[in-house]
Structure formats: structure tokens, C-alpha cells
Amino acid sequence: MPELYYSKAVNEALDEELARDKNVILMGEDIGIYGGAFGATRGLFEKFGAERLWETPISENSFTGLAVGAAMMGLRPVVEIMFMDFIALALDQLLNSAGKLHYMYGGQVNVPLVMRTPGGAKGGYGPSHSQMLSNLLVGVPGIKVVAPSNAMQVKGILKAAIRDDNPVVVIENKRLYPQKGIVPDGDYTLPLDKAVVFSSKLAPTLTLASYSSMTPVCLAVQQAFEKAGIGIEVVDLVSLQPLDTATVFASLRKTGRIVIAEEACLTGGVGAELSALIAEHCLDALEAPIARVAAKDLPIPSSLAMEKMILPQPDDVVKAVKKTLDY
Amino acid sequence: MQIPNEQLLEMYQRMVLIRTFEETLGELFAKGALGGTSHLCIGEEASAVGVISAARDTDWLISNHRGHGHLLARGLEPRRVMGELMGKLTGYCRGRGGSQHLSAMDRHFLGTNGITGGGIPIAAGAAFALKYQHKDEIAICFFGDGASNQGTFHETLNMASLWKLPILFLCENNLYGMSTPIAHSCASGSIAPRAAAYNMHGSACDGLDLETVYFTAQAAIERVRAGNGPELLEVMTYRQCGHSKNDPRVYRTREEEAEMAKRDSIACTAALLVQRGLAPEAVEAAANAARATIAAAAEEAMNAPTGGLQDATSDLFAN
């Protein structure tokens, strides 16, 4: 099985789906000859042409709306929002149209729309180009939200998202794009609503839940603790809406302790929601308070030194794990 | 150019149907039989009936918050539109959408839209799909003068023109965005000239004269269908009623309203029919038939069942 960059896995998923289904079209800024700001569509324009790749003006809300209309008519548009921060410009069409049409029109229409967008900080992009805005999306009914953390996941999930009859936001990550991972040969899809468990060789004493860029961080922490003789089970959430609570709860019932790590701001997001659900359904399993590691509730400064102070660092995860184990 | 008498009588009847529907809604609100709010199109009927009569039944329509006229002009069943507004299971969207979110895909009506300007890119997306699928249907997108100040208007006209999409952008300029007069909101004073900025044909027409609307729209629709790219047509109309159900209309004078009422399209079309040789009794009979249809529709909708918990909680996602 080949090892691919995360960005190349995205590219292969798009390539294969464009070839498989003529109803699949891509829309977004600079996705043509340029290949997308992060190279995700590189080579596709040459292969599929202007008929399939629609390079748009800088009009996020309207090209998203256009994709909604095209989806209502049977196409399967995949739109790229260049930086996740720019999703703010497309939110009206995403939440007032895409997420509601099937329900509010009484089931008459489907909106098989995929929105791909890289969230997260890569280092110095600054306040409007660095955010992980998962918090904004998970409170909107009618939109599936996934945040794959490695090359194999992103390829299988993006392909599944394109084949799904509902709007799906695929949160990619600028820090993950240059990371390599094993990708199976041939056509495969992965479920849009399932968390993935990375077990420990040792009996697990703590659950470490994360998604997107924080999963590789958590896996490194898992290895470090394993060397010290402590077993940690990493639950990669993958799906943020809906949350695969069954998998999280099953792990927590084994370990009794949980740390939730995410790159988004602390308040009102996935970690907060998961904490509430654990408190509602799994309180009896907890042997220590739930711990959360997240970005501080602040804009992300451009200065690399200050950016680190705002974003969750590997050491923050280690500290939270130790504190939870020592409780 | 004249519309033949038989067709003109049908169009007149359709306008009366819309007017009666809207007046009936007003009464139902007063009785407390309707929830939410509603945006009536009393005075604007010639636009809906003129434009939609000029289109094919297979052309795709999208409308805005003031969409009852468009729905009924397309021939949707009044009893089911009324049912939708009352939140009944007989409604086109089983009571979930209501007035501002009403779709009938089998009638090629993509939907009304509660976000001002929200339907504009969606309509262009439908046109995009029609072109992609090599169909000879077009999209017609209704919106108001207020929506033409939204970013979606400008963004979408730009993209539609770049990509030569088969869409007619139909601006119903009723001179007020809710309460704000167009002079306070639109730097160009009117909408049609904005087409030039997007390298598309833009024109305006009298929206109170049914035949003018019909023939102007017909010509625009055929140009769009011929593959000449999108067009912007500004239909100058007048909303005789308030913006929504609780609007005391303090932003305009009763004198202005009385002056505009003299040009009421329904009264003018009735007079035209008589002038062209129809018996006044025949004109009145057509109107009465429309009124009876609405009375029966309201009665049926009132007695229709409301959805239960299952209806309220299903269909969040397609399977």
C-alpha cells in the first residue's frame, strides 16, 4: 500500500470521484491550473477540464449557493473554501439553505453538496487564516461535519461524502496536508459517522479523544506514555456531527478517565458538547473530572511565538493527561 | 401586440385568484387562524401572472418571501398552498416550510426563500445544472429591489454572466424594501442599469400593465433560452398592502397609495377585456369562479390535519 501526503489523498479522492460520476463537479477559487491554494486539485484541471472544474470569482456565499441549486437539480458539487476562516462568508447558504432544504421542503429535494475546507493554524498565518471553526458548524442541524486526521481517512471519507445525498463539510487541515500516511489501493469509502479507536498495547487507563490535527499529537502522547508503562486509548472522533458517542462511551467505561483535545476554541464546541454528553449519560463511569485541551478563547496572533501560546501544544495534552491520571 | 381575449381572460382570472388568496390570508390572520407572518403581493399580480404565463411550465422558478403570487401563477393548487401556510399536512412541504419556504419540485418551482437575496445564487445553480445537462429549460429568479443590494445579487449576476447561464433575473421593484424607499437604498436609483456592470442585458418595464409585462418577459425569456446568457428585467410594480401583517405604512402617504390604486392591474385588465368586446358578466363570472376556488381552498385547509411528532422530527437527512 502506498504512502501518500494527506493533500495527495484528497487529490486522489477528487480524481477518482470525478472519473466515476459525471454529476460530480468542483467549484472554488484558484482550483484550476493553479491547483488550489494547498494543491488539492493539482492536475485535475488538465485531466477533466473547465467543464468539470469551475474556477469561481471570489464570491464564497454565492458560489456555495450556486452549488446548492445545482445539487437540488441532481449534480454533486464539491466546493472548496480556501481557508476555513472564509466559511463565514458562505454560512448563510450553508445553514439557511443547504442544511435545511431537505427537511423544510418536506423531503422533496436532496442537497448532495460537499464543502471542503482547511482549518487550523500552520504557523504564522494570523487571525483570519488560522482558525479551526468546527464550533460554528456543529450546532447547525442538517449538516454532517467530518474532520479526518490522516491520509487514509480523508480519502475514504471524502469519497463517501461525495456519494452521500446530504450536505457534508469535510474539515481538512493545513498542518495535516504535508503529513504522510498509508493509503489502501483501489476504491474504498469510510463511514461518515464513526469514530476510530487507536488502542494501546497496554491496558488503557485513560481515553484521549481528539480530531483533525490534534489526533497525530495525541498518538505521539500515547506512545510516550506507553514507553512509561501507561496505556492510553486514543479515540479519533472523525465525525463531529453527529458525534459517535457510543464509541467514546465504550472507551470511557473501560478507562474511567477522559481528556478531550482539539484545535478549536475552548468554548461552545465539540469538546464542550462531548463533555455535556458524558455528564448526561456516563457520569457514573468517571473516576476523574473531564479535562479539556483547546485553543484559548482568543484570536490567533500572527507572531509564531504568540501563536503557540494560544494554540494547544503537545505539552498541554501531556499535562492534562498526567493531572487526570493523578486525580 | 395583444394577448388573445381567451388567454387574457384566463390571466385576469389568475390575478383575481391571487388577490383573493392574499385578501383571505389577511382575514385569516385577523381571526388568528394563521401563525407567523406573511408578505402579501396585493397590487403586484400582473408581474407574477405576466412573467410566468410567458414562461414554459418546465422552466424553473425560484421566488422570495413574497411568493404566493408566483406559486399560484405557476398553477400550484391553492388548497395546498393554503394548507402549507396553515402548517397542515396537505401543504406542499407538509407544513414545515410555510409561506417563505415553499417548494413544489414536480411543478418546477424550486422554492420561495426567507433570506432576502438567498434564492438568487440557488436559481443560478439550477440554471448551471440545466446548462450542464444540456436542457432547453431556463431558470427565472424573482426577487425584490431590496434584495438587489445584497452581495448575492452582485456576486451571482457576475458569475451567471461569466458562465452564460440560462437565467432571467426578475426584479420586482415595488419601490420599498420593507419600509425603506428605493431612493434611500439604491445608489443607482433603479436596478436595471446595474446589469451593465455585469455585461448583461438589463431593461425595465411597467409592471402594472399585464400585456407589457407579458410581452417584455416573453422576449427576454426567448433570448435567454436561445443561449445569449442571462438577463436582468426590472418590473416596476407597487405593493398596495403593507410589507407584512403588522405594517401601518407610516413611510408613505395615503395620497400616494390612492394615486397608485388608480392603476390597479386587476381593475385595468377587467376594463380592457370589456373594451375588447367581452361581456361584463363574463368577466365577473371568471372573477367569481376564482373567488369560489379560494373560499373552498381555505375551508379545506382549515379542516386539514396537522402533523405529529413523527412529521416534525423526520427527514433531517436524506437516506
Image (cartoon, rainbow, N blue to C red):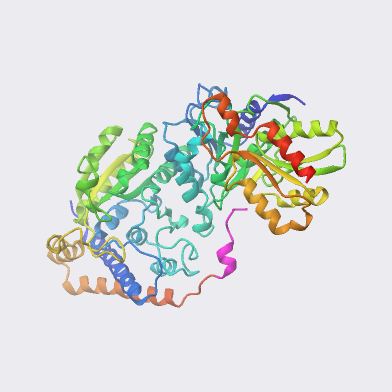
Give the left or right position of residue B40, taking residue B84 as reference.
left
Which sits in the foreground, A267 or B301?
A267
Residue B317 inside the magenta-drawn segment: yes
Give the magenta-colored segment's residue range. Answer: B308-319
Corner quadrant of residue A123: top right
Give the left or right position of residue B280, taking residue B108 as reference.
left
Instruction: Answer yes or no: is residue B91 visible.
Output: yes
> Residue B304 appears at what percent x and percent y?
47, 75
> Residue B92 appears at what percent x and percent y?
46, 63
Residue A258, placed above or below residue B38 = above
Residue at 80 percent of width and 39 percent of height: A232
Which sits in the foreground, A66 or B207?
A66
Which sits in the foreground, B241 or B180?
B180
Residue A49 inside the magenta-drawn segment: no
Residue A140, placed above or below residue A40 = below
Corner quadrant of residue B178: bottom left
Corner quadrant of residue A15: top right
> Residue A285 appears at what percent x and percent y?
78, 55
